[in-house]
Image: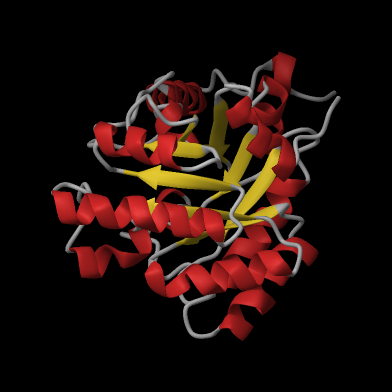
Amino acid sequence: MKKITAPVIRSMKAERQKIVMVTAYDAATARMVDEAGVDMVLVGDSLGNVVQGLPNTLPVTIEDMIYTTRMVSRGISRAHLAADMPFMSYQASKEDALRNAGRLIKEAGAESVKLEINEDYVETLYSIQKTGIPVIGHIGLCPQSVLEMGGYKVQGRGGKEARRLVNLAKMVEAAGAFSLVLESIPRSLAREITNSVRIPTIGIGAGPDCDGQVLVINDLLGLSPEPTPRFVKKYAELREVVGKSTRAFIEDVRSGAFPSEEHSYD
């Protein structure tokens, strides 16, 4: 079984092989998606929303990310494991960035880190990758900037902002990122960026022309409550399955049907 590394991911663009990434937040889920054949597993700071029940990702700490990534790493044998650098784990200084990126690799078992990037953090990305840590850039809608953006809004509409994102993508590539996440931008802009850089682009709400796609596992499996973003496609309705199964268990316990003789010890 061939291990998928950062160079393998980068080569997939030239080979015109679509990249599949999903998030995971525990060992059991990581093992299932790894066995299913995904190329990349991302421990996203989206754990703040889908695991911790927070309204956004801002309160997620580096300790949260290390703990969760360590669990996920135990379930993966083939896929490439990436971890988000959470809010304020890299913004204050390059020293903080290097220390925290190193912790995600050394303590948590990540094989790359992902940074939400604007022009101010391109040098930070460069500094991290120079230490030998593979880095994924993330541009477009950056959830850690939700307060500045005034909500979760599509980015890159309008000529000036589109040009800025194209230029930023090129800067991220030049700084040494091995791949680039494009979130919630127009399809035409995602296509232009994808054609403008040699590193693979991975879209989430960026249309079909990216080199790969990523979804949050809770969205993919239908575990997230409504409403979900327009870009989400549900491949199962596990929220309904969980509800139905739990109600059946409640009924069996209250009626005395469970546990039966079959489920009891002599």
Residue 48 position in % (x across, y down): 44, 58
Residue situated furthest top in the rendering: 262
- Left or right: where does residue 145 sit relative to residue 179? left
- Which of the 4 image quarters holds residue 228? top left
Q: Please name whichever residue, 27 or 146, is drawn nearer the observer in this view of the structure.
A: 146
Viewport quadrant of the N terminus: top right
- Left or right: where does residue 76 sit relative to residue 224? right
- Which of the 4 image quarters holds residue 24? top right
- Left or right: where does residue 191 sit relative to residue 138? left
Q: Residue at x 30, y 37 (%)?
A: 225
Q: Residue at x 40, y 33 (%)?
A: 219
Q: How many marks?
A: 0
Q: Is residue 228 visible?
A: no
- Left or right: where does residue 221 sit relative to residue 33? left
Q: Is residue 47 above or below residue 127?
A: above
Residue 207 position in % (x across, y down): 32, 29
Q: Residue at x 49, y 35 (%)?
A: 217
Check the image and tell me how it is coloured: secondary structure
Q: Is residue 39 visible?
A: yes
Q: Please name whichever residue, 136 or 199, is drawn nearer the observer in this view of the structure.
A: 199
Residue 210 position in % (x across, y down): 43, 31
Viewport quadrant of the C terminus: top right
- Which of the 4 image quarters holds residue 144? bottom left
Q: Residue at x 67, y 62 (%)?
A: 67
Residue 92 position in % (x across, y down): 48, 84
Q: Is residue 253 above or below residue 236?
A: below
Q: Is residue 45 above or below residue 212?
A: below
